[in-house]
Image (tube, rainbow, N blue to C red):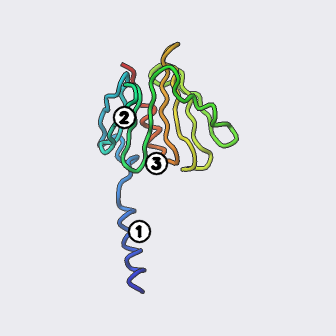
Amino acid sequence: MTTLSKISIFLLVVSACHPTDTELIGSDVKTIDLPGFTVTAPALWTSFEFPGGNSGTGGLTNHMDTLAYNLGHFPDDLHNETETDYDRTNATIDGHDALIVTPKKNGVGVTGVYINYSEFVKLGINGTDLKDATTAMNIFYSVRFK
């Protein structure tokens, strides 16, 4: 067995032993306080605001996946994500009507939620080509408005 083969096998074994964010949900989580709402996410996730943006725009990241959010009048309502390429699911999150979209091909496309909070305030959270869509879904369902 060549040295390169041994290194490849070692890296494969080490990466298989590393817990995913999904495995951390329920054990090592935190509440992240964002403008107008909170989410629960794995402890490794952090929040940020977009430079020059208004107080209702920003994101969450674990430096592998990133979710952008927009709380206001015109967040992305996910209308471009059609049933041809996406599963579209109606849901209720924190007592409000929501639309969740997930790509039919895992890891390729937008994974997002659009929540109708009030007549004038909507929340959109989405990420593109996510490696761990399950954690994103857990974050979506954890939204609590202030």
- Labels 3 and 1: the sequence-earlier one: 1
Depth check, mark 2 against mark 3: the one in front is: 2
Circle 3: element type:
loop
- Specify the farthest residue to the right: 84
Q: Which residue is mark 2?
A: 51
Image point (52%, 13%), residue name: 119
Going by the numbered disc 2, the residue's amino acid type is Pro
Query: What distance separates the C-alpha of mark 1 from that of mark 2?
Result: 38 Å
Locate the N terminus by quadrant: bottom left
Q: Quadrant of residue 76?
A: top right
Q: Residue at x 46, y 48 (%)?
A: 132
Where does residue 97 sit, x and y in percent of width and height? 54, 21
Q: Position of residue 80 (x, y in %)?
A: 64, 35
The residue lying at 52 percent from left, 36 percent from top is: 112
Of the two numbered discs 1 and 2 on the same chain, state the one appearing first in sequence.
Answer: 1
Question: Residue placed at 43% from the left, 43% from the top?
Answer: 66
The quadrant of the image that shows the C terminus is top left
Which residue in the protein does label 3 denote? 132
Q: Nearer the viewer, mark 1 or mark 2?
A: 2
Q: For label 3, count other residues whose C-alpha is less than 10 Å away and answer few (under 14), some (14-19) or many (20+).
A: some
Q: Which residue is mark 1?
A: 12
131 or 127, which is in the foreground?
A: 127
- The mark that comes first in sequence, 2 or 3, is 2
